[in-house]
Image (cartoon, rainbow, N blue to C red):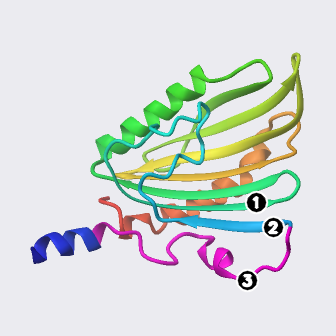
C-alpha cells in the first residue's frame, strides 16, 4: 500500500511546475483576459485538429493544462501530460500527427513538420484560408515527447501567412520545460 502511494506521488505533476502557473494564479481584474487551469487527466489535447475527446487519452497517468485567453482573438496554452510509458506517449504523438493529416478542411488547414526537440517533436500549424490564400487567424503549436511525457505549447491569434518565426515563443517554452521535465518523467 505504501509503495503504491510513493509511486503515485512520484508520478504527480507538482504544483507550480508548469511555466505559466504563477501567472495563472495572479488575480486579474481585466474582463478581457482570463486563465483557466485543470489537473484533469482526461483533459482534451490543447492541440486537437479533429476536436476528438479521446485523442491521446490511452495510457495517461497525469496531466496539467493552462489556457490563457484574451479578447478578441488571442490564446496561449500549456499542457504537460505524463503517460504510463514512453511507448504510450509516442503513440499519442503519432495519433496527433495522423489527426493533423486527416482533419484539415478547405477553410482551415493543418500541417506538421518535425523539429529537433526532445525525443520527437512536431511544429503544428493551423491556418485559416480564403480560397488558396492565407487569411487572418490560426494557431501555432510545438508538441514534444520526452520519455513518457508530452509537452504542448501553443499560441492562437491573428496570424497571417505561416512562417518559422511564428514558433519562437513556443520553442523557447518547450526548451525551458525540457530542462526540468526529467524531474517528474521517466527519463
In the rendering, at what x and y percent does residue 105 appear?
71, 20
Residue at the image point whose x is 40% and y is 43% from the top = 57
The answer to whether mark 1 and mark 2 are in CB contact below 8 A is yes
Residue at disc 2, secondary structure = strand
In the rendering, at what x and y percent does residue 139 appear?
74, 42
Quarter of the view holding residue 72: bottom right
Q: Which mark is residue 27?
A: 3
In the rendering, at what x and y percent does residue 11 appear?
30, 66
Q: In this view, does 66 lie above or below 10?
A: above
Q: In this view, does 186 lie above or below 6?
A: above
Magenta portion: prevailing SS class: loop
Going from the N terminus, do you reach mark 1 or mark 3 first?
A: 3
User: Is residue 14 highlighted in magenta?
Assistant: yes
Q: In this view, does 31 lie above or below 82?
A: below
Quarter the N terminus occupies: bottom left
Q: Which mark is residue 6?
A: none
Going from the N terminus, do you reach mark 1 or mark 2 first?
A: 2
Q: Give whichever of 106, 32 is nearer the camera.
A: 32
User: Is residue 130 highlighted in magenta?
Assistant: no
Q: How crowded is mark 3: few (under 14 residues within 10 Å), some or many (20 or more)?
A: few
Give the Cα separation between the discs numbered 1 and 2.
6 Å
In the rendering, at what x and y percent does residue 22 appear?
62, 79
The answer to whether mark 3 and mark 2 are in CB contact below 8 A is no
Q: Residue 69 carries which label?
A: 1
Q: Mark 2 = which residue? A: 33
Quarter of the view holding residue 103: top right
Quarter of the view holding residue 181: bottom left
Q: Give the range drawn in magenta.
A: 10-31
Quarter the C terminus occupies: bottom left
Residue at disc 1, secondary structure = strand
Q: Residues within 10 Å of mark 2 (few under 14, many from 20)?
A: some
Give the Cα separation between the discs numbered 1 and 3.
14 Å
Amino acid at each position: 500500500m505504501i509503495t503504491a502511494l510513493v509511486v503515485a506521488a512520484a508520478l504527480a505533476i507538482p504544483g507550480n511546475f508548469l511555466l505559466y502557473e504563477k501567472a495563472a494564479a495572479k488575480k486579474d481584474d481585466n474582463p478581457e483576459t482570463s486563465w483557466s487551469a485543470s489537473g484533469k487527466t482526461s483533459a482534451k489535447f490543447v492541440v486537437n485538429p479533429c476536436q476528438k475527446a479521446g485523442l491521446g487519452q490511452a495510457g495517461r497517468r497525469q496531466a496539467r493544462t493552462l489556457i490563457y485567453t484574451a479578447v478578441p482573438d488571442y490564446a496561449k496554452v500549456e499542457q504537460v501530460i505524463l503517460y504510463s510509458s514512453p511507448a504510450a506517449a509516442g503513440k499519442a504523438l503519432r495519433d496527433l500527427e495522423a489527426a493533423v493529416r486527416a482533419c484539415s478542411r478547405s477553410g482551415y488547414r493543418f500541417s506538421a513538420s518535425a523539429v529537433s526537440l526532445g525525443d520527437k517533436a512536431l511544429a503544428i500549424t493551423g491556418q485559416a484560408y480564403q480560397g488558396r490564400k492565407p487569411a487572418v487567424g490560426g494557431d501555432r503549436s510545438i508538441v514534444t515527447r520526452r520519455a513518457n511525457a508530452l509537452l504542448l505549447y501553443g499560441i492562437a491569434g491573428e496570424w497571417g501567412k505561416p512562417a518559422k518565426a511564428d514558433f519562437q515563443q513556443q520553442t523557447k517554452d518547450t526548451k525551458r520545460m525540457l530542462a526540468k521535465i526529467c524531474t517528474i518523467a521517466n527519463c
